[in-house]
Image (spheres, rainbow, N blue to C red):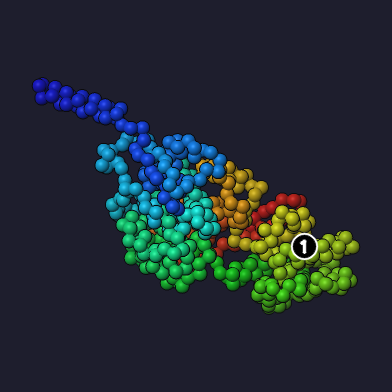
C-alpha cells in the first residue's frame, strides 16, 4: 500500500511540474530571421508547424499582398500538438539551399498502408519567373495534399529549392531525399540524369511535370514524364481529328504567314486524309470571295484549318468566314485550331462559338467552371494572393498532378502506372493518362479538344 502511495505521489509531482513548465513557457518558440529565397510555406514546413499556425503568430501576414523580405524577423509558434523538451522540439534552422523537415527512419511498410513521402525538387524562389511559377505549382501540390487528407490519404511533403544554377546532387545527398516514395521535379534537363540514377538506386518514382524531353524516360521505369514533344502532340491531334471528323469536308486556308511552324501539322494531316481517300481543298486568305466560296462544300460540314496560329491571321480568317456565311448562310462551317488560340479567347470567343470551334491541347483552363472558381478562391484564402494570370494556371496544374499521382500511389503502391481509368480523378484543368515506353518509363498521352458549341457553351473532350 505504501509503495502504491509513493507511485501516486510521484505521478502527482510530475504532473504539476509539467504544468508549471508549460505555464512558464514563452509565447513563441523563437524568432526566425528571413533569408533570401525563403517562403511562408517553406518556413512552416521546416519548423514542423502548419501555415495557419505561422500566420496566426504573425498577423501581418494576413495583409493582402504580404511578402516575406530578407532580414525580417517572424515569430515561430509552438506547434499545436504537445511539445517535447527544448532539445528535442527545436529543429535546426532551415538553410537557404533547402527546406528541411524532420528525418524519419526508413520503413518497409507498403506505401498503401502509411503516409506517402513526397519530395519536391523545383526552383522555389522569387528571383525570376521560373521560381515564381514553381512556387505557385508547389502551392497547388500542397492544396492537393490537404484535399487528399480529407479523404483519409496522408502525405509528408519535403521540398528543396533547386534553382537553375544548383547542383542537384547536393540535395540528393540529404538523407531525407532517399526516404521519399516519389520526387516531383526537376525543372531543368541537366538535372534529370543524376536524379534518374538516384531514383533507380533507391527505388523512388520521379514525376517530371514540365517540358523536359529526356532520354532517361526511355530507359528508367521509375520515371513519369508529363511533357509530350510537339511531334507526338501533332500525331495525337491528327489521329483524333481523323476519328472524329472523317465525315467532314476539310478546307485548308493559306494565311501567308512566312514565320509559321504549323506546316508540320497541316502537311501531316493532308497526308493522312489522302491515305484515307478523303477529298480536301486549299484556298488562300487573299483569294476573291468567289474563289474562296468554291473551296467549300454546300452539302457537307466544312472543317476549316489555318496554317498559322497567330492572332492577326486568325482575326482576318474569321472576318473572311463571316463574310462567306453572310452571303451563303446555308454553308455549315466548323474550325479546327491550335493550342495558342486559347490565349485569344477574350477577343475571339463569339467567333469560336459561331463557328463551332475545336481547339486541341494538353489542358483546358475553363475560367467559367465552378471547380476552377472554387480552387482559385481557396488559393486566395490560403496564400493571400491570386494565381498568376497565365495559361495554364500553375497552381491548378500542381493540384491536378499531385492529386492524380498520390491517389494512384495510395491505391496501387509501386504498381501504379497512371494508365487509363486507374485513378478515376476528373481533372480541373490538366488530364493525365500514362503509357509505358517500351521497357522504359511512362509518358503522358492524354490530349483534349476544347469545343466551343454554337449554343454558347464549352465542353472539354478528353482523349
- The x, y position of residue 16, in whole percent, is 24, 25
Local crowd size for mark 1, using a 10 Å CA cut-off: few (<14), some (14–19), many (≥20)? some
Which quadrant of the rendered structure holds the C terminus?
bottom right
* 198, above or below 113, in the image: below
297 left or right of 381 in image: right
Left or right? Give the position of 394 relative to 29: right
The answer to which of 46 and 223 lies nearer the viewer is 46
Q: Residue at x 83, y 65 (%)?
A: 320
Quarter of the picture containing the N terminus is top left
> 215 or 458, which lies in front?
215
Q: Residue at x 35, y 62 (%)?
A: 170
Residue at the spot 69% in from the left edge and 61% down from the top edge: 341
Q: Position of residue 14 (x, y in %)?
A: 21, 28
Q: Where is residue 177, by image quadrant? A: bottom left
62 left or right of 359? Answer: left
Badge 1 is on which residue?
315
Residue 99 percent coordinates (x, y): 39, 52
Residue farthest front in this picture = 71
Work out whether residue 80 can be spotted.
yes
Number of numbered callouts drawn: 1
Amino acid at each position: 500500500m505504501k509503495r502504491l502511495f509513493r507511485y501516486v505521489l510521484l505521478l502527482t509531482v510530475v504532473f504539476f511540474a509539467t504544468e508549471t513548465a508549460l505555464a512558464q513557457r514563452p509565447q513563441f518558440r523563437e524568432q526566425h530571421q528571413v533569408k533570401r529565397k525563403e517562403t511562408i510555406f517553406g518556413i512552416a514546413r521546416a519548423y514542423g508547424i502548419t501555415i495557419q499556425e505561422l500566420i496566426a503568430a504573425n498577423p501581418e501576414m494576413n495583409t493582402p499582398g504580404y511578402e516575406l523580405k530578407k532580414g525580417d524577423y517572424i515569430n515561430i509558434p509552438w506547434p499545436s500538438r504537445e511539445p517535447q523538451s527544448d532539445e528535442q522540439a527545436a529543429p535546426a534552422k532551415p538553410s537557404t539551399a533547402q527546406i528541411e523537415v524532420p528525418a524519419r527512419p526508413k520503413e518497409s511498410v507498403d506505401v498503401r498502408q502509411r503516409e506517402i513521402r513526397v519530395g519536391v525538387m523545383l526552383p522555389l524562389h522569387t528571383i525570376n519567373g521560373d521560381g515564381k511559377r514553381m512556387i505557385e505549382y508547389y502551392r497547388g501540390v500542397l492544396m492537393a495534399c490537404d484535399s487528399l487528407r480529407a479523404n483519409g490519404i496522408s502525405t509528408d511533403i519535403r521540398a528543396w529549392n533547386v534553382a537553375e544554377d544548383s547542383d542537384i546532387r547536393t540535395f540528393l545527398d540529404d538523407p531525407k531525399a532517399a526516404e521519399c516514395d516519389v520526387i516531383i521535379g526537376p525543372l531543368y534537363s541537366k538535372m534529370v540524369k543524376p536524379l534518374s540514377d538516384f531514383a533507380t538506386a533507391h527505388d523512388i518514382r520521379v514525376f517530371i511535370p514540365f517540358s523536359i524531353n529526356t532520354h532517361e524516360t526511355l530507359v528508367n521505369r521509375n520515371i513519369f514524364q508529363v511533357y509530350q514533344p510537339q511531334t507526338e502532340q501533332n500525331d495525337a491531334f491528327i489521329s483524333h481529328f481523323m476519328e472524329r471528323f472523317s465525315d467532314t469536308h476539310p478546307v485548308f486556308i493559306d494565311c501567308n504567314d512566312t514565320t509559321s511552324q504549323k506546316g508540320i501539322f497541316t502537311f501531316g494531316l493532308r497526308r493522312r486524309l489522302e491515305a484515307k481517300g478523303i477529298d480536301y481543298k486549299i484556298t488562300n486568305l487573299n483569294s476573291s470571295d468567289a474563289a474562296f466560296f468554291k473551296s467549300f462544300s454546300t452539302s457537307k460540314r466544312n472543317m476549316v484549318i489555318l496554317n498559322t496560329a497567330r492572332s492577326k491571321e486568325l482575326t482576318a480568317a474569321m472576318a473572311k468566314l463571316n463574310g462567306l456565311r453572310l452571303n451563303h448562310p446555308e454553308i455549315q462551317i466548323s474550325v479546327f485550331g491550335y493550342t495558342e488560340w486559347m490565349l485569344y479567347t477574350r477577343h475571339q470567343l463569339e467567333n469560336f462559338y459561331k463557328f463551332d470551334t475545336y481547339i486541341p491541347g494538353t489542358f483546358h483552363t475553363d475560367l467559367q467552371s465552378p471547380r476552377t472558381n472554387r480552387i482559385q478562391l481557396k488559393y486566395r484564402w490560403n496564400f493571400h494572393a491570386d494565381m498568376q494570370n497565365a495559361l495554364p494556371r500553375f497552381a491548378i496544374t500542381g493540384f491536378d498532378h499531385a492529386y492524380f499521382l498520390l491517389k494512384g500511389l495510395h491505391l496501387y503502391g509501386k504498381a501504379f502506372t497512371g494508365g487509363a481509368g486507374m485513378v478515376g480523378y476528373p481533372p480541373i484543368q490538366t488530364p493525365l493518362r500514362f503509357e509505358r515506353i517500351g521497357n522504359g518509363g511512362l509518358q503522358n498521352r492524354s490530349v483534349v479538344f476544347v469545343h466551343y458549341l454554337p449554343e454558347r457553351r464549352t465542353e472539354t473532350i478528353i482523349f
